[in-house]
Image (spheres, rainbow, N blue to C red):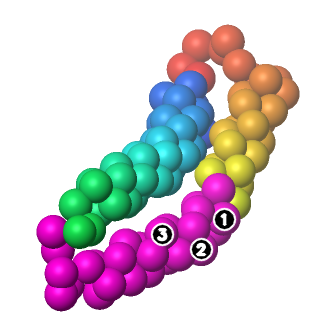
Amino acid sequence: MSKAAISEEGISALKRLAQNLNENIEVIEKATNELQNIYEENAPYLAPHADSLGQVIEDVRQVSSEAAEPVDGLSEKVIALADEYREFIDDDPYAGIAGN
């Protein structure tokens, strides 16, 4: 994992991380929905395994739903950290002095 420095690059990296966390939750949700649709279309042909496959899909949906809230919270904390870094840079009295 890369280090986030108190710099423009560090702020950008933190914001990208927060965005990626949210996007990954959306990707998992979309993939689970696609899997559910495929299952529903093919359930009549899956006997005797249809019920167990349906349960697996429901378990995946439940686990991903439970994980989404903590990931969203992490994303918010990362954004807050990026905002703190932004304030630090904006309030730096030595900004613009040679060597900084």
Residue 26 x, y percent position in the rendering: 49, 46
Between residue 11 and residue 49, name the one nearer to us: 49
Q: Earlier in the sequence, mark 3 or mark 2?
A: 3
* Alpha carbons under labels 1 and 2: distance apart: 6 Å
Image vertical order of residue 26 relative to residue 71, above or below: above
Residue at the spot of label 3: 61
Work out whether residue 10 can be spotted: no
Please, what secondary structure does the residue beneath circle 3 have? helix
Q: Does residue 15 appear left or right of residue 87 in this picture?
A: left
Between residue 97 and residue 23, name the one nearer to us: 23
Indicate the amino acid at tag 3. Arg
Residue 36 x, y percent position in the rendering: 37, 60
Residue 80 x, y percent position in the rendering: 75, 46
Mark 2 neighbour class, 10 Å CA radius: few under 14, some 14 to 19, many 20 or more: few
Between residue 42 and residue 28, name the one nearer to us: 42
Mark 3 neighbour class, 10 Å CA radius: few under 14, some 14 to 19, many 20 or more: some
Q: Residue furthest front?
A: 44
Indicate the amino acid at tag 1. Glu
* Alpha carbons under labels 1 and 3: distance apart: 13 Å
Q: Nearer the viewer, mark 1 or mark 3?
A: 3
- The reply to whether the C-beta atoms of the residues labelled 1 and 2 are less than 8 Å apart is yes
Q: Residue at x 53, y 30 (%)?
A: 12
Range shown magenta: 45-72
Residue at the spot of label 1: 69
Image vertical order of residue 43 relative to residue 32, above or below: below
